[in-house]
Every structure is written in structure tokens, then in C-alpha cells.
Amino acid sequence: QVQLMESGGGLALPGKSLRLSCEASTSLEAINVMAWYRQAPGKERELVARIPTGGPTTYGKTVQGRFAASRDNIKNTASLQMTRLTPEDSAVYYCYAGDFWGRQAFWGRGTQVTVAS
């Protein structure tokens, strides 16, 4: 069982930046995939960034070039640096940890990000 806790959400002005963090209760060395998802009201949960161990990080089309995700297997954390935020980025952001086959999947409770002037 892996417990994940997100932090760093809040209110941001359009064009500004926020950094989200995800702290895991266990070592990330055995976690194949870390990821960030988000869900806005009335919309399906969507992939923001996928950080596989030993592979390239991939991003959703709407955040490509603006967001940067990383993981630190020593500190057991993952992060999401969000820049040039727009109101469309407003959502609850979730941290995810799992294996390559989806047989194991763990979710954080989410952190709210609101982008508004």
C-alpha cells in the first residue's frame, strides 16, 4: 500500500506559476510509474504528466511546454512545476503511483488549483 499526499495547490493569477509536490509513504524505487492527473468540474480525469522509471516523461497536449514533472526516488517525492497558468488549468490535481500494467494503482486525495484574476 502506498499513500500519497499532494501539496502546493491554491489560487494563482493567469500567467503565473505554481509548484505541486507529492510525498509518498514508501520508497519510489519500486514504483514503475508516477503521474499527475487532474479533474475539473464536469469533466473526466485527464493525464497531465507521466513519469516512468527509466523512461521519458510525457505530457498531456494541453500542458506540453508549460508544465514540468519530475520524481525523486531518494526523497520519495514527485513534483509538478506549472507555468503560464490559464483558467483552463483550474482543477483538482491528483498524484498517482502504479505499475506498468495497471494492476496496482494508488491515488492521492488531490489538491485544488484555481487560476483566476
Image (cartoon, rainbow, N blue to C red):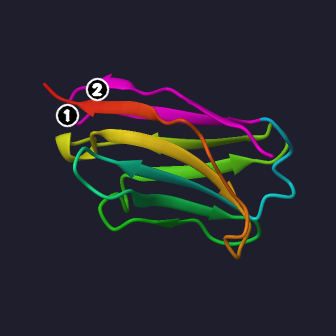
Q: Residue furthest bottom?
A: 101
Residues tagged 1 and 2 counted as in contact (Cβ below 8 A): yes
Q: Is residue 112 left or right of residue 15?
A: right
Q: Nearer the viewer, residue 21 or 104?
A: 104
Q: Residue at x 58, y 34 (%)?
A: 21
Res. 82 in view: no
Quarter of the figure that contains the C terminus? top left
Give the percent coordinates (x, y) of residue 30: 86, 58
Q: Is residue 104 magenta?
A: no
Chain part drawn in magenta: 1-24
Amino acid under label 1?
Answer: Pro
Give the percent coordinates (x, y) of residue 98: 70, 60
Q: Which residue is mark 1?
A: 14
* In this view, 79 is above or below 99: above
Q: Which residue is mark 2?
A: 12
Q: Specify few, some or many for label 1: CA neighbours under 10 Å numbering under 14, 14-19, or 20 or more.
A: some
Q: Residue at x 28, y 45 (%)?
A: 89
Spatial distance from mark 1 to mark 2, Cα to Cα? Answer: 6 Å
* In this view, 53 is above or below 18: below
Q: Residue at x 76, y 70 (%)?
A: 54
Q: Is residue 44 left or right of residue 105?
A: left
Disc sitting over residue 96 in the figure? none
To which quarter of the image does residue 34 belong?
bottom right
Res. 11 in view: yes
Amino acid under label 2?
Answer: Ala
Please, what secondary structure does the residue beneath circle 1 have? loop
Q: Is residue 17 magenta?
A: yes
